Image (tube, grey):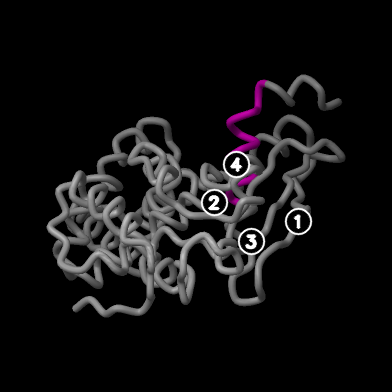
Amino acid sequence: MSKKIVSISSKAFEEKIGSFVSSLEIPFKDITNYCLAFIHRSVLNENIIHVTESNERLEFLGDAVLELISTEILFHAYPTKPEWELTDIRSALVRGKNLASIGLKLGLQDYVLVSKGELLAGGNTNPYIVANTFEAFLGALYLDLGYNEAKTFVEKYVYSTLSEILEKALHVDPKSHLQEISQDKYLVTPTYEVLKESGSDHNKSYTVGAYIGTKQVGTGTGSSKKKAQQEAAENALSEQKNWEKTIKT
């Protein structure tokens, strides 16, 4: 099922990624796409390693695979829950913050290749980049070993975080929760402002600020404005103790 779509000249890099994949007990057949999963677009114009493309296409595939597998697992695990609640739970599972946390625990940041400038800015540990790398890795796994192996991987590393998500009510829509707090305490509705846009037209990254009145209470980054707003609201909720006393009622 795997197809070679990138040329990587560094044998050492292939061996490094092969060792990492093996450490996860993944019986890979072709290491090529796993290597590609760790190629950030910033490295394409630098002579670090010879590649013909970045991990963006694999990320696109992995995102869809993750959503399908998560949907199937939740559908069977919770036969009495309504669609809207399953959607909220799935959103929390596949949210960038959760994937970044999983990716950092797996050590993906030690393998992802970014440009020198991006590396100096901490790019290899940037939650957005780590989350995207996780999705690209899943895409590579799906191409190499198929749906069942990809599902096993998701069950082991993603679905296993569900108990904490439910316990901390992280599946509750953060924008709705922040709005309830803001309207109840301050009689205003939170607003969101795009602070930064980066990336090419087909692979944009947005950084958004969440505001209560004129006070910025959170910041989030995502591949769409909607995702960035969700991250900003979630960040605001996690920092509530730091800003709630500074806002005048």
Foreground disc of the pair 4, 2 = 4
Compared across the picture, whether 239 is left or right of 214 comes to left
Label 3 belongs to which residue?
A: 205
Q: Is residue 207 something one can see in this rendering?
A: yes
Placement of the C terminus among the 4 image quadrants? top right
Task: Judge whether 214 appears above or below 54 on screen.
Answer: above
Amino acid carrying mark 1 in the image: Lys
Q: Whole-Å distance between the Cαs marked 4 and 1?
A: 17 Å
Disc 3 crowd, CA 10 A, few/some/many (<14, 14-19, 20+)? many
Q: Nearer the viewer, residue 204 or 68?
A: 204
Q: Pointer 1: what residue?
A: 196
Identify the residue shown where x is 23% and y is 63%: 72
Given the image, on which type of amino acid does mark 3 rest? Ser
Secondary element type, mark 2: helix
Give the quarter of the figure containing the N terminus: bottom left
Residue 236 within the magenta-colored segment of the rendering: yes
Q: Residues within 10 Å of mark 1 (few under 14, many from 20)?
A: few
Q: Residue 223: image x %, image y %?
A: 58, 62
Nearest to the eye among marks 4 and 1: give it.
Answer: 4
Q: CA distance from mark 2 to mark 3?
A: 9 Å
Q: Earlier in the sequence, mark 1 or mark 2?
A: 2
**Which residue is label 4 attached to?**
122
Which mark's residue is nearer the viewer, 3 or 4?
4
| Badge 2 or badge 3: first in the primary sequence | 2
Asked whether the beta carbons under mark 2 and mark 3 sit within 8 Å of each other, the answer is yes
Please give the range of residues in magenta. 230-241
